[in-house]
Every structure is written in structure tokens, then in C-alpha cells.
Amino acid sequence: MAKKGNRIQVILECTEHKASGMPGTSRYITTKNKKVTTERLELKKFNSILKKMTLHKEIK
């Protein structure tokens, strides 16, 4: 049986794409430990629409 932990699923959304006003979105799903990382995640990920690495921030 799987152990229940402190890891939760979070959604990362591209900040540059959102600001540009282009249609569509660039989102990634990942997990984080909510006890260790209490602040929102910010990671550089690849945006396939803009075709470059951009900053993705946690939403919700």
C-alpha cells in the first residue's frame, strides 16, 4: 500500500505567454513537498508555442 505523504500536485503556467496575449497556454504539472517548499514554485521550462525557455510560475 502506498504511503501518504506531503507531496501535492501543482500546475505551472508560462508568464511570458500569458503577457503576450497570444492564443493558447503553456502549462506543466509537477509535484512539490508542501512542508519543505511553502512558497510558490518558479521554474524555467520550454514553451513549445514561443519555442524558447521561459519562466513558469505556480498557479492556484
Image (cartoon, rainbow, N blue to C red):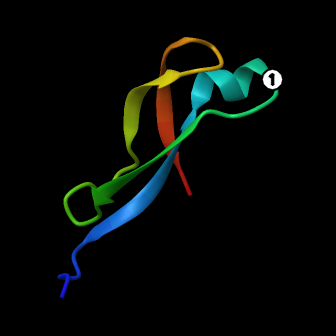
Task: Give the residue at x 38% y 43%.
Answer: 41
Q: Secondary structure at mark 1?
A: loop
Note whether 24 is above or below 6 in the view shown.
above
User: Could you tell whether 41 is left or right of 18 in the image?
Assistant: left
Note whether 39 is above or below 57 in the view shown.
below
State the quadrant of the C terminus: bottom right
Task: Give the residue at x 29% y 64%.
Answer: 34
Note whether 27 is above or below 15 in the view shown.
below
The answer to which quarter of the image holds residue 37 is bottom left
Q: Position of residue 3 (x, y in %)?
A: 17, 82
State the quadrant of the N terminus: bottom left
**Residue 38 in view (yes/no):** no
User: Could you tell whether 4 is left or right of 47 in the image?
Assistant: left
Task: Give the residue at x 57% y 11%.
Answer: 51
The answer to which quarter of the image holds residue 33 is bottom left
Q: Position of residue 29 (x, y in %)?
A: 46, 49
Instruction: Give the residue pinned by disc 1.
Output: 21
Q: Residues within 10 Å of mark 1 (few under 14, many from 20)?
A: few
Which sits in the foreground, 16 or 45?
45
Which sits in the foreground, 53 or 1?
1
